[in-house]
Image (spheres, rainbow, N blue to C red):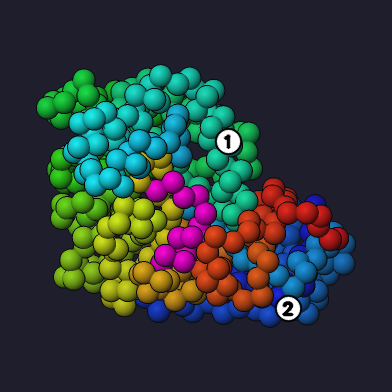
Amino acid sequence: MRRLVVNCGQLLTMAGPAKPRAGAQLRAAQPVPDGAVLIEDGLVAAAGPRETVLRDPRAAQALVLDAGGRLVLPGFVDSHSHPVFAAPRLEDFERRIKGQGYEQIAASGGGILSTVRGVRAAGQDQLAEGLRLRAALFLSCGTTTLEAKSGYGLERDSELKMLRAIRQAAAATPLELVATFLGAHALPEELRGRKQEYLRRVCEEMLPAVAAEELARFVDVFCDEGFFGVEDARGVFLAASRAGLAAKIHAEQLSRSGAAALALDCAAASADHLDLLSGEELGSFAGSTTVACLVPGSNYFLGKPYPPARGLIDAGAAVALATDFNPGTCPCWDMRMILSIACTQLRLTPLEALTAATINGAWALGLGKTHGSLEPGKQADLACFDAEDYRELPYYFGSRPAAWTMKKGEIVHALGSLAG
């Protein structure tokens, strides 16, 4: 089927080189006034000024969708989230407000392991249905592709249950889910003090099972003090490589672990968080295919210092933005809130933030050749917002959902009726 989106007051295509946008390239895209997008069989056929797109002979036979003078851009690609869980951690939230730290919360039964207990007790159908319902919230805010991690099972059957729930939910929602195996998230209670035994289970029991069922595209490791070290992560990545899975890593979040250097050494798709990255390390990302994925929503929610985003960009790094949606430290699914935090606290320009949340998010998931920009041959994933200027997205935080969201050329969320 052919569809023609016209009357885009501003159109951001994010068209550009077929690689992550680094340094000044993050602000190179320019809005197209009075834009249009021609779609055929779920893919972008043409995008740009309306008069140019209308010259394509295929446009005459297309179903027209009038954007009403609104802003249209690629759907957000959220490259870091933990959306599979049984319940939010409301007790943790209140205890943190009262001044309790991580160790106190964990000692009282909270933290990651409280979510682990909930996931272990839940059935696959329950986890899948919860994810399906949350997927609708992401779609309503303009996100069309979402990375989804396991990591709240911490034993073979529960980790597989989480990943199967992601696959099950993916069949029931138009939101595209990219699964990541995060077995090395924390030590389970039953193996406290026996880290090497648990890592053996991750590498020899869990990873082969994940690969055999093709349940994940990536393997992630929480590489930080009190969790897993650099050599632990290196061993997991070697096992992942043998299983045909690519690497991502939680890096330099709570302590300076050396995980960022490992990510670059292993050519990981992304190194995420990077809150404590040193000034000497900023330039190491320049020229690398590893995307620096920042998740400032968690810093906001926890009241922690923000990552050195401005320094990374000025040093020539490719930076992505993601929500880090999870039940404990960032219960935010709206990428527009992340854009606002990135602009006001990390000092990204609105255009840099939007580039980081679209095309660079796609590259952080290895999808840059097919997702994240509106260019011929790429998936027709679009988001339309009730705005006249792209700068309004980070400016008005807490605003209404997207006017409509499109996945593979089909409307999957809409407010009210659509013209055309």
| Pointer 2 residue | 34
Please, is residue 314 above or below residue 6 in the view?
below
Say what amino acid the circle numbered 1 marks.
Arg
Q: Which numbered mark, 2 or 1, is in the foreground of this view?
A: 1
Query: Viewer-proximal residue, 74 or 140?
Result: 140
| Pointer 1 residue | 132
Q: Residue at x 60, y 56 (%)?
A: 142
335 in the magenta segment: yes
Residue most toward the front?
A: 98
Left or right side of 264 for 45? right
Residue 299 visible here = yes
Please, is residue 273 above or below residue 135 in the view?
below
Say what amino acid the circle numbered 2 marks.
Asp
For the residue labelled by badge 2, is the local secondary structure a helix, a strand or a loop?
A: strand
Q: Position of residue 362 (x, y in %)?
A: 48, 57
Corner quadrant of residue 212: top left
Q: Residue at x 41, y 71 (%)?
A: 344
Q: Position of residue 407 (x, y in %)?
A: 66, 51
Query: Viewer-proximal residue, 8 or 100?
Result: 100
- Local packing at callout 2 (Cα closer than 10 Å; few below 14, some 14-19, many 20+) is some
370 in the magenta segment: no
Query: Viewer-proximal residue, 214 or 168?
Result: 168
Sooner in the amino-acid sequence: mark 2 or mark 1: 2
Q: Residue at x 29, y 36 (%)?
A: 111
Q: Residue at x 16, y 70 (%)?
A: 280
- The Cα atoms of the two marked residues, 2 and 1, are separated by 35 Å
Query: Viewer-proximal residue, 97 or 365?
Result: 97
Corner quadrant of residue 384: bottom right
Q: Which residues are magenta?
A: 330-342
